[in-house]
Amino acid sequence: MQDTPGTSNRTLRPNARWVDVSTRLRDAIVSHTLAPGTKLPEDELAAIYVVSRTAIRSALQALAHDRLVRLEPNRGAFVAQPSKQEAREIFDARMLIEPRVAALAAETATRADIARLRHHLEDEDEALHADQMSAAISLSARFHVTLAEIAGHTILTEFVTDLVFRSSLIIALYWRRRDITCDSHAHHALVDALARHELGRASELMTSHLADLLAGLDLTIGDSKPRSLADVLR
């Protein structure tokens, strides 16, 4: 993930460098390269990515906003480490909200919406087949946000977006079955229900899909031997 000094990182515009670092760190977290609880010192990250500490600070703040990183006063930044209770509460909230969102989307979905979703499913399938798990998890999250947008409910969309970001990290950290990261069959079935405007079916499918996601997680963190950031991120 590290560029050789003097190459692409140095050619990035100053205001784009923190975005690039944020993307790279996000990928490292979601792909399990960085373990939960890992400390993220600004000076070490600046040396690894050949950027200023200001750029690192902006990247970490963006990741903290998405709850992938935890910022602690006088201690620094750490990869987020959701608890077992937090994971269950997040999925409980999703199972309360998203079945309703799916029903609303089934009621309002247009042909253009269905075409958009089917194109998205092609990207999901491609990422899974290529074993690009970071991309697969991100696309799976985006699918759920897109359903909320199609439902046309601004407040519910905000709730779903926040919950999906948080559960994406939980899935990335604790999944024990490869297929739960982005269940292609469940998403395809949901789109089919939306296309037929089957409100009850869409709601039921969403409930079972989220229950399967939760059941496929191992909500325990195993001990691992610490590794230096330079070894991990390079």
Image: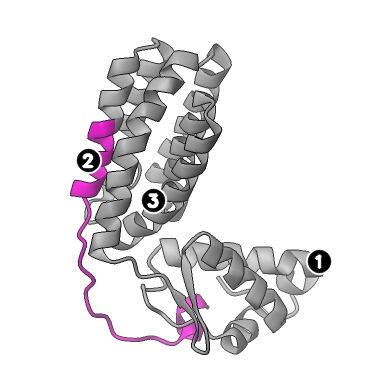
Judge whether 221 appears above or below 77 on screen: above
**Element at label 2:** helix
Q: Type of residue at label 3?
A: Asp
Left or right of 72: which side holds 57? Answer: right
Q: What's the mark number on residue 13?
A: 1
Q: Position of residue 197 (x, y in %)?
A: 40, 11
Q: Could you tell me which quadrant the N terminus lies in? A: bottom right
Q: Are marks 1 and 3 in contact (CB under 8 Å)?
A: no
Three-letter code for the amino acid on which mark 2 is drawn: Ala
Badge 1 element: loop
Q: Which residue is mark 3?
A: 131
Looking at the image, residue 183 lies above or below residue 38: above
Q: Which residue is mark 2?
A: 211
Residue 186 falls in image quadrant = top left
Q: Would you say 1 lies left or right of 96 here?
A: right
Front position among marks 2 and 1: 2
Which region shows up in magenta? Answer: 207-234
Dot 1 amino acid type:
Arg
Q: Position of residue 135 (x, y in %)?
A: 47, 50
**88 falls in the magenta region:** no
